[in-house]
Structure formats: structure tokens, C-alpha cells
Image: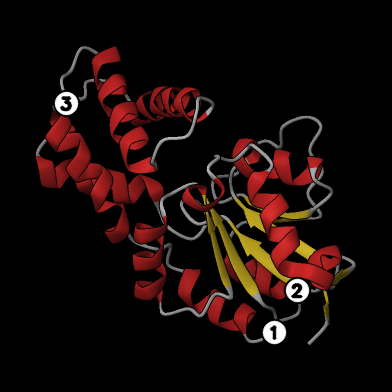
Amino acid sequence: MVVTAKDSSTVLALTFDCFGTLIDWDAGLRQAFQEEGVLDSLKVPWPEFRRTREKREAEWQALPYRHYREILAISLREAFSAFGANLDEPTALRISDSIRRWPPFEDTVSALRRLGSQFPMLILSNVDRAPLQAVVQRLGIPFAELITAEDVRAYKPAPAHFNEAKKRLGGRAEGQLHVAASPFHDLEPAQAAGVATAWVNRTGEKLPEGLSPRIVVKDLIELCKKLGV
């Protein structure tokens, strides 16, 4: 079915980032830290720790491919070390493995059910295939395709995910709308690939210069309304 968004051109398919857009990254990571008893060892504000870990992760992702499980564990250990704390490798790997249990945002499941009734939906994710499949099974949402870093052997913002999505979408690629929260990992490479974007700006951030998403929403329920679903 072809559906026309109220404030956009015709949309033929939706692609989504997963963690940070559909799954609550911060809540999941904090929960994992609490389960492992390591949260109190961090003596810095959470946003500062998060920025440091994300910087370390991006550096590793720009190197030759290795599984995301390893990269997440390494970035956690390096971020702890940067603030004078210690996180041993087994604990870091357990935290990394917990990603398949991290919670969705409150609006995720209901919104995806509505959107999935009108559009084919794909996920473009930087995680490994097995944990992403576990997350999708837990959500109970029938995505048409899952495209992971493990599949394309690269990490967003590299263009490989978007190139693969174009192949799989075929004739619908001209009507692709990519839905994501991260300007760096998703909005920038999607725009560079000529893909229209919907920015899910849950925290009210300022749009980075040079980006022009077609739609900006505070959550996925608002996206449903924008798309007339």
C-alpha cells in the first residue's frame, strides 16, 4: 500500500535504527550496570561517561570490522578507565551480552504495530545479528528485513547499511524514509545517500548544522500522526 505523509512526499517503506530509536539505550545500559554492581564506581555525570564511551566506540568502529559484542565491551572498559575506574573483561562482556534484554521505549511497540500495518519495515543496526533477532522477537513486530553490521561488515555512519537497504527495497527505495535518533550514525549517512529521514528527537537536542530531516518528531507516536497512520 502506498501512503502519503501529511507533510512529506510519498513514503513507500520505513527503515529504522534500533538502539536509541526503538530500544532505550541509556535505560538498558544503566540496568546492566546495576545488575553487575558497577554503577556506583562511576564518579562522573552520566552524560560525560556516555560521550566518552561513544567516542571510544566510534574509533573502534572506524577500524577493520570486528563483532559489536567486542567493541561494546572494549568501549565500556576504556570509558571506565578514562575516569579512573576498573571494569574487568568478563563483566564488560556480560554487559554487552545483556543488550538483547534492554527495554523498548514506551511508545515503540504500539507505534510499530500501527506503522507496520501500512508500510514494509526494515531495521538497519550496528549490532550483531543474533542479539538483534532476539530483540525483534521480544518486540513481536514482523520486520521485513534486518540489516546488521555483521551482515555488511561495516558500521554506520559508513554507507554499507544504506547501500544494502537500497538493494533489498528494490523499486521501493525511492520512497524510503529512514527513522532514527542519532544524527551522527544515521541522519548524516542517510542524507549523504539521498535517503529521506525522520529524526526522533526525544531529548530536544539542537539539529546539527547541515542536516535537513524531512520530519522531526519527539517520539514514534508523533511519527504515526505525521504519516497519517
Picture residue at 39% right of the left edge, 41% below the top: 68
Residue under label 2: 227
At label 1, the amino acid type is Gln
Residue under label 3: 87
The residue closer to the viewer here, 67 or 13, is 67
Query: Is 41 displayed left or right of 111 in the figure?
Result: left
Helix, strand, or loop for circle 1?
loop
Residue under label 1: 118
Picture residue at 75% right of the left edge, 74% below the top: 227
Query: Is 107 displayed left or right of 173 in the figure?
Result: left
Q: How far apart are the two marked residues, 1 and 3, measured between alpha carbons?
A: 45 Å
Pointer 3 local density, CA inside 10 Å: few below 14, some 14–19, many at least 20: some
For the question of whether residue 217 can be seen, the reply is: no
Count the labels in the image.
3
The residue closer to the viewer here, 4 or 138, is 138
At label 2, the amino acid type is Leu
Q: How is the image coloured?
A: secondary structure
- Residue 112 lies in quadrant: bottom right
Picture residue at 9% right of the left edge, 38% below the top: 37
